Amino acid sequence: MTKDLDLKRFHTVQLVPVTPFDKEGQVNPEATRQLYDRLGKAGIRVFIPCAGSAEFHALQADEIVSVIQNAREALGSEASIVAPVGFRAELAVELGNRACQSGADAVLVMPLAFPYLSDAGAEDYYRCLLDEIECPVFIYKKGPIPSDDLLLRLAEHPNLVGVKYAVNDLDAFNQIVAADEGRIDWYCGSAERFAPFFALAGSRGFTSGAGNICPGLALGLQAALEAQDWTEAMRLQHLILPIENYRDRQGSSFHVSLLKYAVTCTGIECGSPRAPQRQLTPTEENEIRALVETVRAAEEGYLQ
């Protein structure tokens, strides 16, 4: 367990690819390889398979490990792969170590899905994972627990390398990045809608689901942010926003179903999401198909 990881490789778009299913609702290895191959050829270099927008909570550990293996075979050594872990501590440790043995470079501890949370209990949980997972660890913050104070304490651990920060309080993010003083990396966990603003506050990169559909625009946005070309960054962000705004409808309940159908519209069959994710109506499918055509046309124009 060490921080001996080239973190500069993660200072980019961190894509969460959807998890394609076949007609029986099982993980589709061939479609998975097609998707990862397409995204790799488009220039994506950091992948977080099976995370939140890829149905982490509906997947079995064996399925996650198989997707990690498939992704590594499809992407080769050029890509960095981060495996999601969560639920009870023993399961998270087992899954993390299996994933790393199967080709993952690091793990991402998903938001805690337990009732009655406290920093005290969360600290015990995180320290268990940091002590026992045999590869570098990122933590995903999406609520008040873990608190910023706890994250700063955990930053002292040699196995913690970064935080995916998805609480859209830019002042708090700015303060925690400054207080950390460079011990670990901090990333925008709220995708393209918030990426420019997090970048101003010290984010090293951002996670993306829209990049499944328009990887060129997502990478272009990151390049503009790195160059501090804020005008270009906002222009590209607005080209991507139709996807993100639709995903955010009705309590963000379209995050998974939109992405899976949108990728299907691009020629890679992804199947329907598992319960309890929402199923799309014919009207919603028509809206998403039109949206995909618009965004893909914008990407083609950008890349020419």
Image (tube, rainbow, N blue to C red):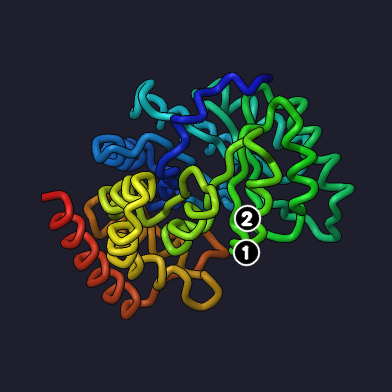
Name the residue type under label 1: Asp
Kindly identify the residue that appears in the image at 24 percent across and 63 percent down: 295
The image quarter containing residue 15 is: top left
Label 1: state its secondary structure: loop
User: Disc 1 versus disc 2: distance between alpha carbons?
Assistant: 6 Å
Q: For residue 146, say whether it is visible.
A: no
Kindly identify the residue that appears in the image at 32 percent across and 53 percent down: 229
Q: Which mark is residue 173?
A: 2
Q: For residue 254, say whether it is visible.
A: yes
Picture layout, residue 275 above or below residue 165: below
In the rendered view, does 279 fall on the left or right side of 35? right
Residue 65 image offset from top left, x and y in percent: 54, 32
Name the residue type under label 2: Phe
Picture layout, residue 161 above or below residue 119: above
Picture layout, residue 2 above or below residue 80: above
The image quarter containing residue 299 is: bottom left
Q: Which mark is residue 81?
A: none
Asked if labels 2 and 1 touch by Cβ distance under 8 angstroms, the answer is: yes
Picture layout, residue 47 above or below residue 284: above
Q: Which residue is mark 1?
A: 169
Residue 161 image offset from top left, x and y in percent: 62, 32
Kindly identify the residue that appears in the image at 30 percent across and 35 percent down: 40
In the rendered view, does 161 fall on the left or right side of 227? right
| Image quadrant in which the N terminus is located | top right
Name the foreground residue: 59 vs 154.
Answer: 154
Name the foreground residue: 205 vs 242.
Answer: 205
Label 2: state its secondary structure: helix
